[in-house]
Amino acid sequence: MTAVRQSSGMILVDAGMSFPDEEMPGIDLVLPDFTFLREHADELKGVVLTHGHEDHVGSLPYLLREFNVPVYGTKLTLGLVRSKLQEFGIKKGDLREIKAGDTQNLGGFGLEFINVNHSIPDAIAIAIRTTAGLILFSGDYKIDLTPIEGDPMDLGRLAELGNEGVLAYFGDSTNSERPGFVPSERIVGETLNDVFQKAKGRIIVASFASHIHRVSQVVEAAKKHNRLVGVAGRSMVRNVQIARDLGYLDLPDNMFVDQQRDFGRIPDSEIVVMMTGSQGEPLAALSRVANGTHRSIEAGPGDTVVIAAHPIPGNERGVSRTINNLMKRGAEVCYSPLMPVHVSGHAAQEEQKIVLSLLKPRYLVPVHGEFRHLRHHANTAMTLGIPEENIFILENGDRLEFKNGKARRDESVSAGMFLVDGGGLAEGASGVMRERQQLSEDGMFIVVARVNAQNGQLLGPPDLISRGFVSPQGSNGLMEQSTETVRKTLERTAKGRVTDRGELKNAVRKDLSSFLSNKTGKRPIILPLIVEV
Amino acid sequence: MTAVRQSSGMILVDAGMSFPDEEMPGIDLVLPDFTFLREHADELKGVVLTHGHEDHVGSLPYLLREFNVPVYGTKLTLGLVRSKLQEFGIKKGDLREIKAGDTQNLGGFGLEFINVNHSIPDAIAIAIRTTAGLILFSGDYKIDLTPIEGDPMDLGRLAELGNEGVLAYFGDSTNSERPGFVPSERIVGETLNDVFQKAKGRIIVASFASHIHRVSQVVEAAKKHNRLVGVAGRSMVRNVQIARDLGYLDLPDNMFVDQQRDFGRIPDSEIVVMMTGSQGEPLAALSRVANGTHRSIEAGPGDTVVIAAHPIPGNERGVSRTINNLMKRGAEVCYSPLMPVHVSGHAAQEEQKIVLSLLKPRYLVPVHGEFRHLRHHANTAMTLGIPEENIFILENGDRLEFKNGKARRDESVSAGMFLVDGGGLAEGASGVMRERQQLSEDGMFIVVARVNAQNGQLLGPPDLISRGFVSPQGSNGLMEQSTETVRKTLERTAKGRVTDRGELKNAVRKDLSSFLSNKTGKRPIILPLIVEV
């Protein structure tokens, strides 16, 4: 999410979300922090979307709950957003459809939408005429000169804008470590054709649910090889439905197996099932098939499974587990890089150079990607003569001010991540994340001690209960010794007439913790409960 | 760890360990389960090691605590094992040095050791003459025809054994998805030379501590470019010491910076520091440098960091974080595949074909690797004419019996993983692992209720304490409502005269759990404590 602001108002380019990393156990989603928006709510005139992927639209339901502003996007992008808003029970969303080539005034900004290629149809770049000059957001893009659907990226219009003069370019950096040019999506179709040619049994193809081009190519292969098409996995079912309704997917009714329970009735050699789970997500359709727990689909000897996606960093083990399990069942598994069943949707270095050369921006702000990717995008731009001082690598909350044709870093604003845990937004989550990590690595001990309310004397031995704690082999009587440790502490404090509850608890915590750490090398969370009787 | 057994006795080939996956929070190491060995302890005659990597020798300290048997290995392998045993306070280890080319009788088996190349010196394959025939364990290997140290893999001896007749071949499968031939370790030396040539500031090279060849090449580059060599990270310091002592690393004293505190005194352009942390391990030397928390080494603008290793699956995010942090500090970071700073130590498909063609084994047992890698190794062997029914893909505990020149699967034995948590072996760990996962994702609630010991009446409102649980924004009074839920449950049970403690606790758990799940989508562990007064 990027805010573009001038005296006439503020607009947002995209409103995405991300997924938790291993330091956020139990967290479902990560949203941008809306604090700055709240502080400037009266300036906010609307949101403009580049495409329909979660990392660009995923925080919209949360945003629109708080801010009642119009949202501009292309047909498919809005189709996906509409369904997302419905899921969240939001009816009032003011969604305004635009298309590549359109221009639009919003909050004093002159917007123009430019066709780009990406792994989802209807993706656009956004040119914004500001009082400071023309700036351009690429969104996620690649240059596909033989796209599956729609037109190649509108390089002509980028060239015109470049000749007019671009003040700043905010360019996709995801693939900036990759030399060369990303192949056209079309080569995946050729591989699929080969796979369908050879396959005798059932075919399963897993990919991102939003990758409508990929689904489209599976449908084309199915037409050629006389197979019906089924769809499994909630998001895949939903997205295929939207794409069919809006005319982005030519999947006629007589080819479509609507009900999952019908999959089993169709001979294996006459069906292909598209499904979720290409990232090895434990609960997704493909993982269930791999574990043998899917209620209507199996894969075994003679069947072919195509994993038409790369693992996103962090998902490698999950994907590998899925591949192993499918192979153990005897299925043939096709995956990248062993077979060209996936191509990236993000521009590699030569594509980035083409766009930079056409736009000739005065300033570059590399966006989308980790720091290493932003840095490599910057390096590529420098080989084209953009001076290092005209490249700004920004972090969340950083501000860039353009004035009289010059850019400078302004003071950063409050920004960061907002964690969604279960149903709602999580407050004070960072402390809880630390607790969860400690709980999961060292476990916890609860100490219940009953004391005389008058004199603080211990009544009977304390009760110790542990969770997530392993008694090491050979450490016989660890619980008894722990109980004894606590009993001694409480007797000592009682003698010393420690009546302050906090001190009492601290003493128990300290003594038991050092006993356990000494015996087991672990430091569980210790929770002393003093019950006065 | 593989047991080879005949009527004369049993020997073990290797005794490795592995690292926990994301489903084993807090676990330090994973060992093979020794149950079968305990049941057949009297048969065990010794252990033979192929090389000194943790996944082949790491469980030895645990094994030797229980079984007093001789361990055979090459000089460097035993040097590493000796240091490991010392660390565990084991003095009695009966370590017997052998070298490639030697033969040895052990427990009625005729052993022969054959030189192979790998990412650690002194690696061997092991041929075993059994009463059933000749079997061969490759250990981890690659074919390096221009090795940094020692001889190329002894293909000649493999050919002779192949002509004599190999009953079964247990072959390394790690790289069996990779077509072609893995390049020689020497190409890394060429890259390092280029890096040293260009570097102006400090150079840091991170790699596996056991990769003595890699260290050796860094030392060679340092000699050529007049830099001193420092070493950081506990295992790197230890392994370099062992390799120098045993003559596997030619690092003269006058080039070696012995004390970490001296690193800062030497001009940046005159030192290279080898360190641990190539896998992004949070506490390793390189991560500390990347975070700016290393006590004697910094990396900033002008400095060069080489990550001379590939991330092991599961470590990608950690490695990426390290790269990002180093780049944010302004250091130049060289890593694979952007630069050829790493080559694998495991044979790719063409190398596997060469070994299979020389050995011409009747049976193949693909080993080392996940199921997908074993399967691909099998597929490669099938292209060379080994029939599918002569290939056995085994899992932990599977038994293969050879009799009259024929192999067949025998009943599996008790096997699996044994988790090491903190200091000791963990008993009953799988239940605890589930608890830890639930604690880390959903947190926990403790309910303390004081009841009258006579009539079961609740005395005052129950106390609720949570850990690892996030109150969602907007769910005001969740704790109060939870308390109220518990109060109602306890009143109801008191009226119904439920005096059974177990039933009482179950009722509290059930009601509070469904309340919380309904309100927050989370299912924390609920621990009701009923204190009778």
Image (tube, coloured by chain):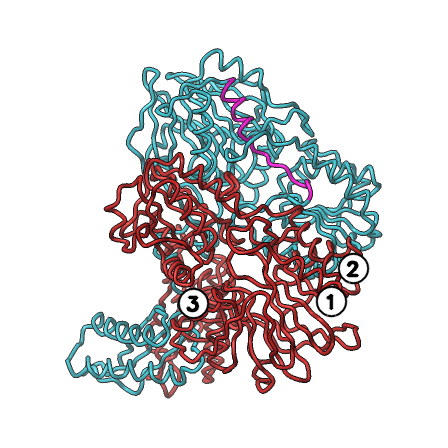
Chain colours: A cyan, B red
2 or 1: mark nearer the eye: 1
Amino acid type of the residue tagged 3 in the rendering: Thr
- Is B227 in front, or is A73? B227
> What's the chain of the residue with tag 3?
B
| Quadrant, the C terminus of chain B | bottom left
Residue on which disc 1 sits = B166
> What's the chain of the residue with tag 2?
B
Residue on which disc 3 sits = B485
3 or 1: tag closer to the N-terminus: 1
**In this rendering, do the residues under marks 2 and 1 share a single chain?**
yes
Determine whether the residue tagged by mark 1 lies in a helix, strand or loop.
loop
Specify the segment rendered in magenta: A339-358
Q: Is residue B501 magenta?
A: no
Residue B205 is situated, as x and y percent measured from the top left of the image, at 40, 47
3 or 1: mark nearer the eye: 1
- Mark 2 to mark 3 CA distance (whole Å): 67 Å
Q: Is residue B527 above or below residue B147?
A: below
> What's the chain of the residue with tag 1?
B
